[in-house]
Image (tube, helix red, strand yellow):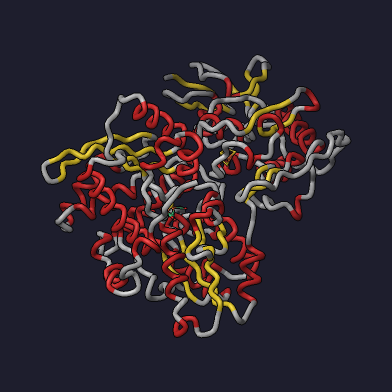
């Protein structure tokens, strides 16, 4: 605790971990390319350098605040230094900005503009590197890498995977997977967190927008969309609307205007997942088999288990993810010649997640030899499509999804935030749907930002031990405890991305701490407005079990195997 003078103003600090945080608290958006509060401090980019009253310069991210410090964040010397850093970075950087997939979201581009860098006086002496397109979800372009190490730390510290690292030194330094492997040949789980942290286009989403446009232009094709829970709270702020507020109705309108024939809500199949997963869970508890049950809706987590904890593969729920269930059910619905009306159905899934692209092509995401989800685009790609079409999104009127798969319960909506799946399961297990009962479940320990949450809930005379983790480094801690017999859980929910799908690898990246909280609040608020909170009270789901699903539940909603 103490006081600092920043640019002539007195600023108090308490437990801020570095000077940079205090400067930002003072309302000065000091630039950085390598500082993120959730990973370790690297201090490589030096852009946050400031000057003190004795003329000493230092990187503010790496200095602890001290009482009495006098700091200048924008002295003439500092301004020159910052501009030179960006100029040098740009000199060694591919400058295809107009065609770069990151254009408009690139921090380096923004800084060049903000700091007034208009001339590059130095020559690029770096060699040209091949693109790595081996991943189903991401493209790595080392020519755009500025060696900030953000991706390396995100993959290592948040995900505990370590698929990326630094190689060589000096001007030869480069970020690459170990032994110069292709990223697809590592234990990368396609989560896209490296892409979220990457300030430039060095790691970008592998886009599939052209395939969608092609399908939309084909008169013989019925293009069907499903929209994941977390997408609706990550679109509005791009168009100047309230951060985190659900704009589902506007998204539905936008998709209809682009030419989508049917627009459905993945919360519907999240309800189906809850029905099947709860059944499976109770069955395993009764038999005492394959416990703890591991949730299966997050494909990055499923890959993590199948790659690194093979002995726990039988514990993974056999339920397909909501994405998988939705696509399988819709494809089955349109197999009926009357519904098909002579058209081929192309299923487009709009997800906050890059790993869903990998899930869609997993061998167990096919039914009767046909791929269930044909194309997966991320929220970021959705924004590009809306912009490309020229829609004035902010002024679009909200529209409802189409029937019969366009409605989900509140339980389905909260899937997009960590703990949501478990909360929906607990709602399903509750015989009571009163406000009080829902409130009690929400308060049992299932909500909150912690990376690992543990609690026990009573159910019919027994205690159910639950663990919820987000971030795969946290998931590893949990699995090690299970493996070593230090924990005895019945149910483990994991979402690979910290805080769940709201912070997925395919979401728009201009997000600060407030965005994370706003997106979570947006989903809980959307749930608050739902009359039906429990998946088992969704009338469309109940109707489906009596109709199309009869005798086909296992075939359409479960997996026989994991790879
Ligand atoms: Fe998710 Fe899921 S919640 S995995 O985070 O179970 O991507 O939003 O669609 O499938 O419903 C993602 C989100 C999403 C699935 C659901
Ligand atoms: Fe690591 Fe995830 Fe990036 Fe793969 S996608 S390199 S696992 S952060």
Q: Residue farthest to the left?
A: 461
> From where the camera sits, is residue 507 visible?
no
Vertical placement of 238 versus 460: above or below? below
What's the residue at 67%, 50% (across, down)? 102
Task: Report which quarter residue 333 is drawn in.
Answer: bottom left
Residue situated in front as seen by the camera: 279 or 37: 279
Quadrant location, the N terminus:
top left
Q: Is residue 216 left or right of residue 349?
A: right
* Residue 253 x %, y %: 49, 73
Residue situated in front as seen by the camera: 259 or 296: 296
Task: Report which quarter residue 172 is drawn in.
Answer: top right
Residue situated in front as seen by the camera: 552 or 89: 552
What's the residue at 48%, 16% (across, down)? 67
* Residue 555 x %, y %: 39, 62
* Residue 309 x %, y %: 45, 34
> From where the camera sits, is residue 279 visible?
yes
Q: Quadrant of ligand 2?
A: top right
What's the residue at 25%, 59% (across, down)? 534
Vertical placement of 262 versus 368: above or below? below
């Amino acid at each position: 605790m103490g006081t600092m003078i920043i640019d002539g103003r007195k600023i108090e600090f308490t437990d801020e971990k570095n000077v940079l945080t205090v400067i930002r608290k003072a309302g000065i958006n000091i630039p950085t390319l390598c500082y993120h509060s959730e990973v370790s401090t690297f201090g490589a980019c030096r852009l946050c350098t400031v000057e003190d009253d004795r003329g000493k310069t230092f990187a503010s991210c790496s200095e602890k605040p001290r009482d009495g410090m006098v700091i200048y964040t924008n002295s003439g010397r500092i301004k020159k230094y910052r501009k030179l850093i960006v100029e040098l970075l740009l000199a060694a950087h591919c400058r295809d900005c107009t065609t770069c997939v990151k254009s408009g979201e690139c921090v380096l581009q923004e800084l060049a503009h903000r700091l007034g860098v208009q001339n590059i006086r130095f020559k690029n002496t770096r060699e040209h590197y091949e693109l790595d397109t081996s991943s189903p979800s991401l493209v790595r372009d080392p020519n755009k890498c500025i060696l900030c190490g953000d991706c390396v730390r995100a993959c290592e510290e948040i995900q505990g995977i370590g698929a990326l690292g630094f190689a060589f030194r000096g001007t030869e330094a480069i970020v690459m997977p170990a032994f110069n492997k292709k990223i697809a040949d590592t234990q990368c789980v396609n989560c896209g967190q490296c892409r979220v942290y990457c300030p430039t286009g060095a790691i970008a989403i592998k886009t599939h927008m052209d395939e969608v446009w092609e399908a939309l232009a084909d008169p013989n094709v019925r293009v069907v969309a499903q929209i994941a829970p977390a997408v609706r709270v990550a679109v509005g702020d791009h168009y100047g609307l309230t951060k985190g507020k659900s704009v589902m109705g506007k998204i539905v309108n936008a998709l209809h205007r682009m030419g989508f024939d049917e627009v459905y809500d993945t919360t519907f199949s999240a309800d189906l997942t809850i029905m099947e997963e709860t059944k499976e869970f109770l069955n395993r508890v009764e038999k005492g088999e394959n416990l703890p049950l591991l949730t299966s809706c997050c494909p990055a987590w499923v890959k993590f288990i199948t790659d690194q904890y093979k002995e726990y593969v039988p514990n993974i729920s056999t339920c397909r993810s909501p994405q998988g269930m939705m696509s399988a059910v819709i494809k089955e619905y349109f197999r009926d010649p009357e519904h098909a009306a002579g058209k081929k159905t192309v299923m487009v899934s709009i997800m906050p997640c890059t790993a869903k692209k990998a899930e869609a092509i997993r061998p167990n995401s096919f039914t009767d030899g046909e791929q269930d989800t044909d194309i997966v685009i991320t929220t970021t790609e959705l924004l590009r499509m809306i912009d490309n079409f020229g829609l004035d999104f902010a002024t679009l009127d909200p529209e409802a999804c189409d029937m019969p798969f366009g409605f989900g319960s509140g339980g389905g909506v909260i899937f997009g935030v960590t703990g949501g799946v478990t909360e929906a399961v607990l709602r399903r297990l509750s015989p009571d749907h009163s406000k009080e009962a829902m409130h009690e479940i929400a308060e049992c320990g299932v909500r909150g930002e912690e990376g690992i949450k543990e609690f026990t809930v009573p159910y019919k005379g027994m205690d159910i031990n639950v663990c919820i983790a987000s971030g795969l480094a946290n998931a590893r801690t949990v699995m090690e405890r299970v493996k070593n017999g230090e924990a005895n859980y019945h149910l483990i929910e994991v979402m690979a991305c910290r805080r769940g799908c709201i912070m997925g690898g395919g979401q728009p990246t201009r997000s600060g701490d407030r965005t994370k909280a706003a997106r979570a609040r947006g989903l809980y608020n959307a749930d608050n407005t739902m009359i039906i909170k429990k998946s088992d009270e969704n009338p469309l789901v109940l109707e489906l079990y009596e109709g199309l699903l009869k005798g086909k539940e296992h075939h359409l909603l479960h997996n026989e195997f994991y790879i």
